Image (cartoon, rainbow, N blue to C red):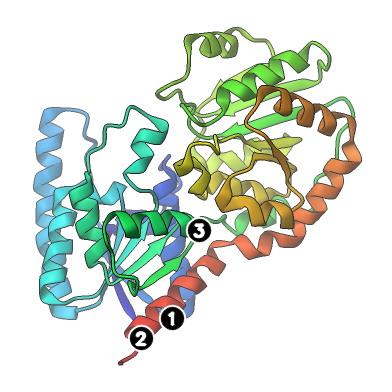
Amino acid sequence: MVKIFAVANGRVLENWREDPFATTARVYNLLNELKKFGVEVISLRYNQPPKTRIINIIIYNIIYTYIALQSIMIIAKERPFVYFEYPFFMIDFQNRWIFRICNLLGIRTILDVHDTIDQAEAISDGKWALNQRIEEYLFTNASLISFSLSPSMWDEIRTRYNISADKKIVFVPNAFEESLMELFQYPYKSVRGRFNIMYVGGLSKNRGIDLLVQACSRLHGKYNCIKLYLFGNYGFGVSDDIKNIIETSDFIEKKFVLRKDIPHELRNADLLVMPYNPHEMYMSRITPMKFFEYIGTGIPILSTKCESLSEIMVQGDIISVDYDVKDFERKIEQLINDPELRNRMSINLMRIRHLHTWEERARRLNEAIESLARPD
């Protein structure tokens, strides 16, 4: 039996639902689905104070250093595969210590890459707790990389850090929980006089929020059935003008929703949008978890033409839109006026959604781990 030690708080593997972060959901779902393939996943469970005050930061680091020492003792004794999420779990220097010690001891490591440091430049001010030197070391020395971004992004990373072409890598995009198929058992059916547009995620630069808000504002005068829901918080790069439209509009509702509550919020949606800027290469190469959760609901999707999602968009009959206000306006109006098109889109999404569950992703990762575990 393959054994994996997860460098993560064991509480995450028990329940991620009170946590607002997509990263936690990925770790929880991917590792728990691996258990279905006979993989034993172990981790240490501990209380983790929030880093809200200096004293809390000190206590946090004391606890985390103790846990890191315990982890190293278990790893050295058991010699399992060791799982690390990147980048967010590697911000803690203690986790980077564990990785280095695994490397020194010749213990095989799995680096699950959710994002790269390019994300900071793409959606915020470019400041990041990690740097290229750390990223290069981790990517170069991991025994197996589970990569959630597109193959072309990996080609760029491999060239940037001069990583060997025979580096073991498996492409494991994000996915959705099978519980969505229970909540959304039947295809979407249009409702006369209703057109609810919903977006889930951060409201920051290169996420297309400005284009979406402007297009919906233009259309609202003509179609008063439009209501736009934005489930996320403001981030870097949203202009004051767009914030003012959002805050003063009578047809836009913005609120933060815990990830566990998102599926219920989407039940009355008529259109789910993924308006990321495909001209920003990093944004075009990621596989946002929201996109797959949208697929899991079977509700019609409007998405910009991101490279990493192009094949799925064709298979699922997802409407593509240029990164342009006028095209957003045109495509949304088309969908308002053609409820039968929306119904057909939903049927196609229901047909393909089984291909994008966490179980399917865990199967890919398990096959790569088994390949690495086989003696040469």
Q: Farthest bottom residue? A: 376
Asked whether residue 14 is in view, the answer is: no
Q: Which residue is mark 1?
A: 38
Other residues around mark 1 within 10 Å, as few (<14) / some (14–19) / many (≥20)? few
Other residues around mark 3 within 10 Å, as few (<14) / some (14–19) / many (≥20)? many
Q: Position of residue 207 (x, y in %)?
A: 52, 31
Image depth: mark 2 or mark 3 in front: 3
Local secondary structure at mark 1: loop
Q: Are marks 1 and 3 in contact (CB under 8 Å)?
A: no
Quadrant of the rendered structure where residue 52 is? Answer: top left
* 278 up-or-down from 215: above or below: below
Q: Residue, x 30% and y 47% (percent of image)?
A: 88
Q: Which residue is mark 3?
A: 173
Q: Which residue is mark 2?
A: 1
* 249 up-or-down from 148: above or below: above
Count up the numbered dots. Answer: 3
Q: Are marks 1 and 2 in contact (CB under 8 Å)?
A: yes
Q: CA distance from mark 1 to mark 2?
A: 7 Å
What's under tag 3, amino acid-wise? Pro
Q: Nearer the viewer, residue 230 or 155?
A: 155
What's under tag 2, amino acid-wise? Met
Indicate left or right for 253 with 70 as reference: right
